[in-house]
Image: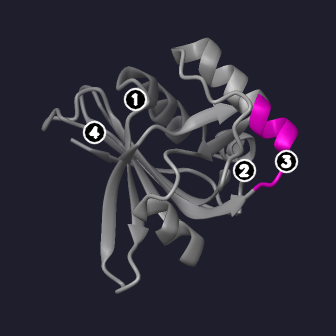
Amino acid sequence: MALWTDFAAAAPRIAEVFTRRHAATGYLCMLGTLRPDGFPRISPMEPRFLEGDLWLVGMPNTAKFADLRADPRFALHTATTDTRVSEGDAKLWGRVEDVRDEALHQRFAEAVYEEIGLDLRGQAFDQFLRADIVGAASVAVGEHMDVTTWREGGVETVVRKH
C-alpha cells in the first residue's frame, strides 16, 4: 500500500486532479465503505492532509467509521456535480490504518483549528485513519478526455478519448 506522498510521486496526474478537486469542493468527498451486510455505503466526508498523509477523520460513532473498523477497505471520490466533468474528477481506493499517536492527533487538531476554526484541541480521537492507497483513477477533460489509472507497484496509464 502507498501512503499519500508515495502515491503522489508514483501517480502525479491523478494526485493533482484529486488535490485540486478536493480543495475546490471545500474538502468534500464521498466515502465508500462496506456495511456489515456486505452492501456498499456512500457517505460524505472531508478528508484532510497532514504531514504528507491523507487522513479519514470525522465525527465519532458514525456508521462509516464502524464499517471501516470492521473492514478497512474504502473508496474515496471527489465530489462532482458537473455532468461534463469539466473540472476533472478523481477516486482513490485502498485500506485505512488506525494510527494511535496522541501527539499527531493534537497536531491535526491544531491544523484543523487554524484552517477552519473547528476546535478539536485536547480531545481524544476514537479512530485516526490514515489512507493507504492501492489504486486510483482520474478524468481530465479539455480538447479530449484523459482517463488515468494507477495500481500499486505500477505506473500511471493514460487512455485518451476523443
Question: Image quarter for residue 17?
Answer: top left
Q: Which residues are magenta?
A: 99-106
Q: Does residue 149 appear to the left or right of 122 in the view shown?
A: left
Identify the residue at horizontal 51%, vertical 30% (top origin): 19
Q: Does residue 130 appear to the left or right of 39 in the view shown?
A: right
Please tell me whether residue 84 is drawn above or below residue 26 in the rendered image: below
Q: Does residue 139 appear to the left or right of 62 in the view shown?
A: left
Residue 22 x, y percent position in the rendering: 44, 31
Was residue 54 drawn as part of the magenta stretch in this picture? no
Identify the residue at horizontal 54%, vertical 22% (top origin): 118
What SS does tag 3 mark? Answer: loop
**How did the renderer colour the structure?**
one colour
| CA gap, disc 1 and disc 3 | 29 Å
Magenta stretch: helix, strand or loop mostly: helix
The amino acid sitting under disc 1 is Arg
Residue 113 x, y percent position in the rendering: 62, 18
The amino acid sitting under disc 4 is Met
Where the C terminus falls, by quadrant?
top left
The amino acid sitting under disc 3 is Asp
Closer to the camera: disc 2 or disc 3?
Answer: 3
Question: Image quarter for residue 9?
Answer: top right
Q: What residue is pinned by disc 3?
A: 101
| CA gap, disc 4 and disc 2 | 28 Å
Tell me, yes or no, if residue 149 can be seen here.
no
What SS does tag 2 mark? Answer: loop
Q: What residue is pinned by disc 2?
A: 3
Closer to the camera: disc 1 or disc 4?
Answer: 1
Q: What residue is pinned by disc 1?
A: 21
Query: Is the C-beta separation of discs 1 and 4 under 8 Å?
Result: no
Q: Mark number for residue 145?
A: 4
Which of the two labelled residues, at mark 1 and mark 3, occupies the earlier sequence position?
A: 1
